[in-house]
Amino acid sequence: MRPGGEWQNWGRTAKVRPQRVETPPSAAAVQRAVQAAGSRGMRLKAIGAGHSFTEIAVAPGVLLDLSDLAGLVEVDRERARARLLAGTRLHRIPALLAPYGLAMPNLGDIDRQSISGAISTGTHGTGARFGGISTQVVGATLVTADGDILTVNESQNAELLPAVALGLGALGILVDVTLQCVPAFLLHALDRRESLDDVLQTLDERASASDHFEFYWFPHTDLALTKTNTRLAESAVRAPLPRVGKWLDESVLSNGLYRIVCAAGVAAPVVVPSVSRLAVKLTGGREYTDASTRVFTQRRNVRFREMEYALPAANVKTAFAELRALIEARAWKISFPVEVRFAAADDLWLSTAHGRASAYIAVHRYWREDPKAYFEAVEQIMLAHGGRPHWGKMHTLDAGALRERYPRFGDFVALRDRLDPGRMFQNRYLERVLGA
């Protein structure tokens, strides 16, 4: 919260001054907050870390800050399952799981989010055989609009799990989440600077042959930064990045150099291509082995705005080629790289990977630049290739357009209508994407 009681998200794309702010430390406190809001006829929303670029967490009425609802509740060692309070930040989870020799199977490249925020918006990493973080959810507890506790797991209300595991905050307030974990493991990381054309020609093979593969393309260059991570047993030999080398890569190059590129783009867009070419030559080219969480995640200090679409994996090369041609045709000076990642198909009702192996194309703009023209033009390309927008990233679709892209959309809306008939948990974003 800012001075004066205003809340804003990390990307500075959404802000609100709520009528009331509460920081519940327990499920019972969440129940009391929901019941009190209901008695006053007020809407209520929970926030995590504010890392969504959409207005999904905007709370004009009662804002529930879940920061105090954090920590490990219990671990089922036999089944490798961990129950975490909803406000637990992703970067805190490795230390909580370490005494039990467990880890999350996959992560995105940023770990500042809360676990409830990450699953509610469909946060994902990369890996053609791995789903997003929501696919790790095997149980959840939430408070519904009438103030009741709803338990969802394999033995209670199991039929609701594919909706609750990625619920957009529309079904209730999550108070805890149970994750299916795996034995702790290492990752061998290989980051390389390669010809973009070579990467595209072998993209299908790279994605299918690697545990976790992604690449970044720097517009105005013919180079890509590829990241290939291979899973190893925890007993494998570690060869982490030297502390100084890690600092140079992440603080000086990845963040410091990007900040210079972006600032230059605002002051004098004409210099962006040459500065981008320099940037790509100074990044990449490292190999190391470390704990999975230290490899999956990176520090991101340069503020940006992002749009990301999930496509059928078979469509990614064609869509990427059209994006590349678009930037050239419009003569835009784009300082941020384009990111391409992969995910396995899953059965979650509102997952961007529902029912299909997926590839993701993400575009970004520095937060001081207007992304509208770039994002809307890219969005048209993504839609033409079967794209589904990431729920936590900028897009223009409404319920009518989204219904056509999700086979279980109607089922989700019907469940929302049943659990929250008075729309206590709705805001303008949810009204747009789910309908009134």
Image: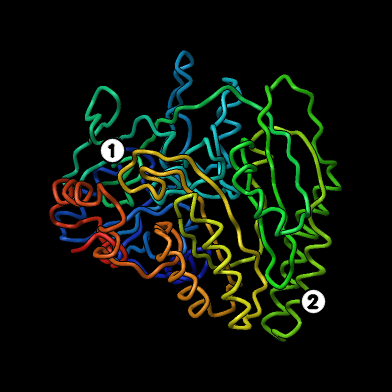
Q: Mark 1 is on which residue type?
A: Ala
Residue that carries the numbered disc 2 in the rendered image: 274
Secondary structure under badge 1?
helix
Q: In this view, does 197 lie above or below 159?
A: below
Q: Earlier in the sequence, mark 1 or mark 2?
A: 1
Extreme-top residue of the structure: 78
Image point 54% across, 40% down: which residue? 128
Residue 269, quarter of picture: bottom right
What residue lies at 47% left-to-right and 48% top-to-bottom? 358
Quadrant showing the C terminus: bottom left
Question: Where residue 134 appears, x then y in whole percent?
Answer: 42, 40
Disc 1 residue crowd, few under 14, some 14–19, many 20+, Cα 10 Å = some
Q: State the residue position of label 1.
A: 28
Residue at 25% in and 55% down: 425
Q: Position of residue 181 (x, y in %)?
A: 50, 27
Q: Which mark is residue 379?
A: none
Spot occupied by residue 278 in the image (x, y as percentages of width and height):
82, 69
Residue 22 place in picture, x, y as percent = 35, 53
